[in-house]
Image (cartoon, helix red, strand yellow):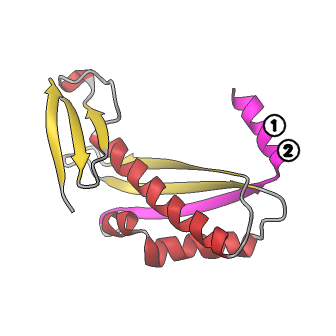
Amino acid sequence: MELILNRATGMTFVARSGSNHWTVMDASPSVGGNGAAMNPFEHLLAAIAGCTSVDVLLVMHKKRIVVDDYWVKITAQRRAEHPQIATEIHIHYTLVGEKIPIADVAHAIELSETKYCSVSAMVRPASKITSSFEILTPEQARELKQQIS
């Protein structure tokens, strides 16, 4: 695997992976960036969220469980001194659908945490990673989205 990163301007960078996909990252204005894109640490959290989501949804699909909607919220605590690594990361999964079995969701998350997600496996030695989940009906999800809109 290969990735090439180029500076676009100031502290804004464009990276291209070996699969020829692009992403942009930026630093905050306090260190010379424009704050115009996710910073590298946010990209790491997004990578964890994406990696575990692929795992969880793939396991649910293989079990023929219909998931109508899905999202993940990650919160992280960082230490104050440099390097400011994440000391704690919490992943909260929300799955939306009718009759989604609790045990199957727990099993899918466990498989991601212990077997499949390479990104969180790389981070786990330095950070305590915990998780939780909730299952909502489509009606509950609509109500929740209306409340936060």
User: Secondary structure beneath disc 1?
Assistant: helix
Q: Which residue is drawn at 77% across and 70% down?
A: 101
Q: Residue at x 31, y 46 (%)?
A: 21
Residue 48 drawn above or below residue 118 = above
Question: How many numbered dots are placed on residues in this image?
Answer: 2
Residue 12: image location, x then y, percent: 21, 29
Q: How far apart are marks 1 and 2 (CA)?
A: 6 Å
Residue numbers of the magenta segment: 126-149
User: Secondary structure beneath disc 2?
Assistant: helix
In magenta stretch: residue 84: no
Q: Residue at x 71, y 58 (%)?
A: 67
Q: Of 42 and 54, which appears nearest the observer?
A: 54
Residue 135 drawn above or below residue 78 = below
User: Residue 134 lies in what quarter of the image?
Assistant: bottom right
User: Residue 142 lies in what quarter of the image?
Assistant: top right
Q: Residue at x 45, y 74 (%)?
A: 116
Q: Of 127 and 22, which appears nearest the observer?
A: 22
User: At label 2, which amino acid type do we have?
Assistant: Glu
User: At label 1, which amino acid type do we have?
Assistant: Glu
Circle 2 residue: 139
Pointer 1 with pointer 2, Cβ within 8 A: yes
Residue 113: image location, x then y, percent: 48, 71
In magenta stretch: residue 128: yes
Residue 146 in the figure: left or right of residue 120: right
Residue 3 in the figure: left or right of residue 42: left
Circle 1 residue: 143
Which class describes the residues within 10 Å of circle 2: few (<14), some (14-19), or many (20+)? few
Residue 56: image location, x then y, percent: 57, 66
Residue 129 in the figure: left or right of residue 87: right
Q: For the C terminus, give its image quadrant.
A: top right
